[in-house]
Amino acid sequence: MEANRKRFDPHITWAADYCKHCFICVNICPVKNLKFEGDEMVSLNKCIQCQLCEKYCPDFALEVEPKKAGTKP
């Protein structure tokens, strides 16, 4: 079954149905871009596309658009 994904940042989509709100993504983000407001994930629009949140999410709830070669953060 495919998750209903929501784009909440220019580079990130989130599947609320998969997310168990473990806060790993919030804690691993080096620029503190992610947070939860109630049950919704929110971006502070500081994403540098490092993909750490996606890589460490145990629920596969996040997808981060890969950074294009030669692009500055």
Image (cartoon, rainbow, N blue to C red):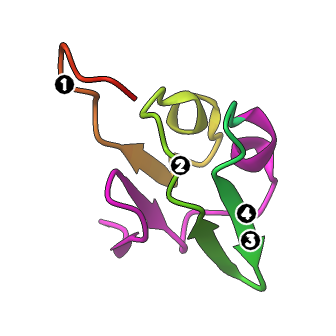
Question: In the drawing, what numbered circle is on residue 35?
Answer: 4
Of marks 3 and 2, which one's residue comes earlier in the chain? 3
Where residue 16 sits: x, y (%)?
Answer: 54, 73
Mark 1 surroundings within 10 Å by alpha-carbon count, few (fewer than 14), some (14 through 19), many (20 or more) = few
Label pair 3/4, CB-CB below 8 angstroms: yes
Question: In the drawing, what numbered circle is on residue 36?
Answer: 3
Q: Which residue does the image show at 77% across and 63% down from the upper left?
A: 21
Mark 2 surroundings within 10 Å by alpha-carbon count, few (fewer than 14), some (14 through 19), many (20 or more) = some
Secondary structure, mark 3, is: strand
Secondary structure, mark 4, is: strand
Of marks 3 and 1, which one's residue comes earlier in the chain? 3
Of marks 4 and 2, which one's residue comes earlier in the chain? 4
Of marks 4 and 1, which one's residue comes earlier in the chain? 4
Q: Amino acid at mark 4?
A: Lys
Q: Quadrant of residue 73?
A: top left
Q: Amino acid at mark 3?
A: Phe
Q: Amino acid at mark 2?
A: Lys
Q: Is residue 66 above or below residue 65?
A: above
Looking at the rendering, the stretch of residues picked out in magenta corresponds to 1-28
Q: Which residue is mark 1?
A: 68
Q: Is residue 66 magenta?
A: no
C-alpha distance separating marks 3 and 2: 15 Å
Q: How many marks?
A: 4
Where residue 24 sits: x, y (%)?
Answer: 77, 42
Using residue 32 as the reference point, say whether residue 13 is left or right of it: left
Q: Nearer the viewer, mark 3 or mark 1?
A: 1
Q: Nearer the viewer, mark 3 or mark 2?
A: 2
Q: Is residue 2 magenta?
A: yes
Mark 3 surroundings within 10 Å by alpha-carbon count, few (fewer than 14), some (14 through 19), many (20 or more) = few
